[in-house]
Amino acid sequence: MDNDINILWKEIVQDLSTVSALWQLLVIGVILTVSGLLNLHLSKQIQAGRVNVVYKMLLGGIERLFFPFVAFLLMLTSRLVLQQWMHVGLLKLGARMLLAMVIIRSVVYILRYVFSPSAWLHSFERVITWTVWVIVALHISGFLAPALQVLEDVQFSAGKQKLNLLLLIQGALTIVVTMLVALWLSRMIELRLMASTDINSNWRVIMVKLVRMVAVVIALLMSMAAVGIDITMLSVFGGALGVGLGFGLQKIASNYVSGFIILMDKSLHLGDIITINSHYGIVKELRSRYMVLRKQDGTEIIVPNEMMITDVVINHTTAAHKAKVPVQVQISYGSDLDLAMQLLKEVGKTHERTILDDNAVDVTIKSFGQYGIDLLLAVWVLNPEEATARLQSDIYYEIWQRFKENNIHIPYPQQEVRIISGQAALNTSQADA
């Protein structure tokens, strides 16, 4: 058993028969109570919106981290103060348990902050939790050092370099922790950049992607250097990667390059309404490899960036972020055409989303149809990504009400069937013979 752990357990056993154990238990109870009350107060402040947004974003999940972190600091301070007059074995044990809780909740917070909720993430969180608690249990019981020695004794060779299982585990943990910290920092910068209104949306996306790429590369180099891997080996890997891009990964590389071209030439922006091939929808996300297009029925389409470069894309959103919404109507030939066009223009101008402009509403005669006159009402609106289908529905309903009030009829398909009498048909047949 480790000497420090042996001394710790001897102090705890000796203190159980003295008053110092009661004092330590009282201090632990007070610390946990104070930390819980402070955490409850801070949670209420966050829910009421009284905490600085930047402070909340930096800590994130503050309700989960605040309690064990504050309790650990108070426990550490109490141990340093009380050890001048009594044994503080229970306080040392409590501080180590709280430190394990801080580590677990910090890692879980970073994982949830970086990755989207999923089944694998929940399983990974459980693995981390059990791993940390097993290490703490081995440490407290004094079996951690023998367990590490067993891992170190498992040795093998990789080329000319001799490795052991403990070194591999340490290297893997170093790489994982460094990458998680890098992704966490890049995620924080991403949220700050995407919330900025002074920077163009396309440039925000470009900066976010560059920040994440740089953070991942720096984290990878730092972790490899910390593990002891020669960074010059990356030159060989880079050559192999170049060959792979030239043969098997050229489509992926093309999509990445196309994504940066689209963002830099400002041909598309988030929220634009576009038509590509037969798909019509709103640009919801611009990723490095693909674009997410949300259709009016709520479904999402993943469009590779290369297709945005090679195919024809119709952008229905202007630079002023407005769009023309068409509404087609047919009236019967017996209805008053002038009155119908006037009513359509009034309906278009009175809608709350219509742009206040003289040219924002236009009514034209499209054609003389088989059953009636086809009219087209064009309405220019702001923020076209906010449910144009609902806008058309509201306009159609208002047109229906106004047409009923003014006796304007909407035709429906009709067919006339003429039946020739049997005698006439027989005479026609004989004449043909």
Image (tube, grey):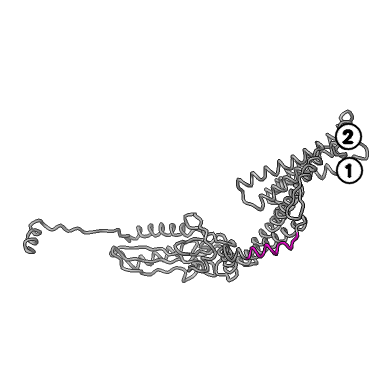
Q: Amino acid at mark 1?
A: Leu
Tell me the crowding category of disc 2: few under 14, some 14 to 19, or many 20 or more residues within 10 angstroms, Cα based: some
Disc marking residue 323: none
Secondary structure, mark 2, is helix
The residue segment tinted magenta is 230-242
Q: Mark 2 or mark 1, which has the lower sequence index?
A: 2
In the picture of the structure, the residue carrying the numbered disc 2 is: 11
Q: Is residue 14 magenta?
A: no
Q: Nearer the viewer, residue 181 or 48?
A: 181
Q: Is residue 115 left or right of residue 318?
A: right
Residue 119 location (% of width, % of height)? 60, 45
Residue 26 location (% of width, % of height)? 83, 34
- Vertically, is 126 above or below 292? above
In the picture of the structure, the residue carrying the numbered disc 1 is: 80
Secondary structure, mark 1, is helix
**Residue 337: in sight, yes or no?**
yes
State the predominant SS element of the stretch in magenta.
helix
